[in-house]
Amino acid sequence: MSLIVIVSIAVALALAVEYVAWIQRRSLRWPSDADLLEGMRRDGIDLSKPHTIEFHLHFASREVALEAERAVVAEGYETQVSAGEGLPTAILCAKRSLVPNKSELRAVRAQLVALARRYGGTYEGWFPPHRAG
């Protein structure tokens, strides 16, 4: 087999692997705010009361996440930066108590998207509180 054919096959395989990885990432999207609110409603969580919500931002490194953390704390969030050993990225968890509704969550999303972008990161989404009892 000629070198050109071998290189062509290798490039095609690499592109196929990257495409499969891209498809998998797309299927792992966070649920929408509306979906999460509906889930909370179904779980019997009182949406008229404040709850602590955990928001997730991803950054290229722990160092960048720690820089972003200062800005997020200044906006009134409790934070924690974590990066699993061997992971190429860091996660900034930002917690805040709020009455979960579409307009409040939209405002938080806009705020955290802007902060994440300022430090080259991405806002991923949020986790609802767990129902007690």
Image (cartoon, helix red, strand yellow):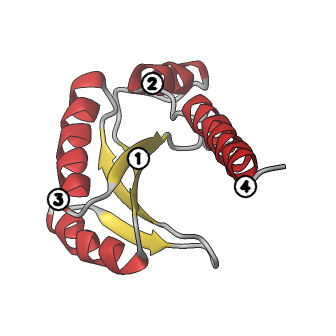
* Amino acid type indicated by mark 3: Arg
Residue 106 rendering spot, x and y as whole percentages: 24, 30
Crowd class of label 4 (few under 14; some 14 to 19; many from 20; radius 10 Å): few
| Residue at the (68%, 49%) spot, across then down | 4
Secondary element at tag 3: helix
Crowd class of label 1 (few under 14; some 14 to 19; many from 20; radius 10 Å): some
Secondary element at tag 4: helix
CA separation, marks 1 and 2? 11 Å
| Residue at the (27%, 61%) spot, across then down | 77
Q: Earlier in the sequence, mark 3 or mark 4?
A: 4
Left or right: 44 as drawn, with respect to 67: right
Secondary element at tag 2: helix
Residue 130 rendering spot, x and y as whole percentages: 58, 43
Residue 99's quadrant in the figure?
Answer: top left
To which residue does mark 4 refer?
3
Q: Earlier in the sequence, mark 3 or mark 2?
A: 2
